[in-house]
């Protein structure tokens, strides 16, 4: 019975120790990324806008640092930004009530130029919010 208890305790302690070492390594990597001096090369690498290699936006800086620090994957950032673009129906760069209205109005149309006689239930509910 002693060996079973010993194995349980030692396994738990070893796992906890490995977790702490990994957490310290991640924290050290984040500190290193945040402490780095900005260079023209880094700006070009961080820029996601074609042809704008000499400047970056706040979002580009944030996403690049999060990816480099290992906090998120580039594919996650790209998926989130793509979803934002889908929701930004007005293409204003922000999400607001106008985007909700425009999305609901788009549902009124089956094909360009043809208006539905009855809007979908979802469209009707979205538009009713603004009456």
Image (cartoon, rainbow, N blue to C red):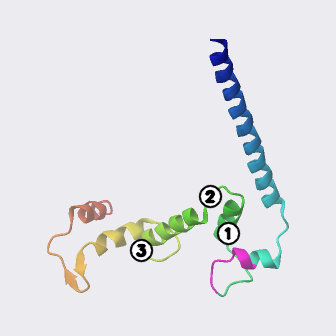
Residue picked out by circle 3: 89
x and y, in percent, of residue 2 in the image? 66, 12
Residue that appears at 70% across and 68% down: 61
Say which element carries label 3. loop
The residue nearer to you, when weighing 12 against 128, is 12
Q: Which residue is outermost to the top?
A: 1
Q: Residue 102: x and y, percent?
A: 36, 73
98 lies above or below 14? below
Report which quarter residue 14 is drawn in: top right
Query: Which dot, 3 or 2, sits closer to the camera?
Result: 2
Q: Please say if 13 is above or below 40.
A: above
Stretch in magenta: 44-50
Q: Position of residue 90 (x, y in %)?
A: 43, 76
Whole-percent x and y of residue 3? 66, 16
Q: CA gap, disc 3 to disc 1? A: 22 Å
Residue depth check, mark 2 versus mark 1: number of the one nearer the observer: 2
Disc on the earlier residue, 3 or 2: 2
Q: Is residue 35 left or right of residue 55?
A: right
Question: What residue would you read off at disc 1?
Answer: 58
Give the vertical position of 24 relative to 130 (above or below): above
Q: Circle 2: is it few (<14), some (14-19), or many (20+) Cα within 10 Å?
A: some
Q: Nearer the viewer, residue 3 or 44?
A: 3
Residue 37 image-quadrant placement: bottom right
Q: Quadrant of the N terminus?
A: top right
In the image, what residue occupies the spot 14% across and 74% down? 117
Does residue 90 appear left or right of residue 70 in this picture?
left
Determine which residue is flagged by label 2: 72
> Few, some or many C-alpha atoms within 10 Å of disc 1 (few <14, some 14-19, many ≥20)?
few
**Regarding mark 2 in the picture, which secondary structure is present there?**
loop
Per the model, the C-alpha gap separating discs 3 and 2 is: 26 Å
């Amino acid at each position: 019975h002693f060996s079973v208890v010993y194995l349980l305790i030692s396994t738990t302690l070893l796992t906890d120790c490995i977790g702490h070492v990994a957490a310290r390594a991640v924290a050290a990597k984040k500190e290193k990324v945040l402490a780095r001096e900005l260079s023209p090369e880094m700006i070009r690498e961080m820029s996601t806008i074609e042809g704008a290699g000499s400047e970056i936006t706040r979002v580009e800086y944030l996403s690049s640092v999060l990816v480099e620090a290992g906090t998120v994957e580039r594919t996650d950032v790209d998926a989130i930004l793509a979803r934002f673009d889908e929701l930004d129906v007005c293409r204003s760069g922000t999400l607001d009530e106008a985007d909700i209205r425009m999305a609901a109005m788009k549902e009124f149309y089956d094909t360009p130029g043809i208006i539905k006689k009855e809007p979908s239930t979802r469209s009707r509910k979205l538009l009713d919010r603004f009456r």
